[in-house]
Amino acid sequence: MTAMANGWGGKRPGSGRPAGSRNKRTREMVERLDRLGLDPISALARVAERAEAAGDLDLAERCWRGLMPYAGPKPTVPRQNAPTPDKPTAASASTPVVELPSWWRPGRAP
């Protein structure tokens, strides 16, 4: 008889840490930053803005790239085999269709 046949082993419903919950070390770090009154995201954005103003585009790009995961969902290219009726397919358009996040504003500085 195997362990699974006995009802032992394997994944059990409700076991383990819930999805999206933070581990102990992450919770401690967030609490510590809060106690110190520090906001690393704001600090990184300030560094990016100052680097951009100073002409250090390499540093500015690295800072902005570090902040991108927190800005919204990644733009996606719709699958060609599953067209949506209200949007042109990539095959019918001269350039691929890219869905931009809702926070994106046209005319924003590159």
Image: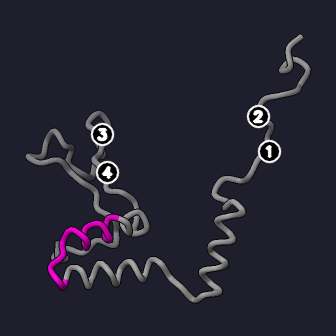
Residue picked out by circle 1: 15
Picture quadrant of residue 105? bottom left
**Viewer-closest of 71 and 100:** 71
Above or below, 80 against 72 in this view is above
Which amino acid does the dot numbered 1 rest on? Ser
Picture quadrant of residue 23? bottom right
Q: Which mark is residue 11?
A: 2
Q: Quadrant of the N terminus?
A: top right
Q: Are marks 1 and 4 in contact (CB under 8 Å)?
A: no
Using the numbered discs, state the Cα–Cα distance from disc 1 to disc 4 in whole angstroms: 33 Å
Residue picked out by circle 4: 76
Using the numbered discs, state the Cα–Cα distance from disc 4 to disc 2 in whole angstroms: 33 Å
Residue at the extreme left of the image, as rendered: 94
Residue at the extreme bottom of the image, as rendered: 37
**SS class, disc 2:** loop
Which amino acid does the dot numbered 3 rest on? Arg
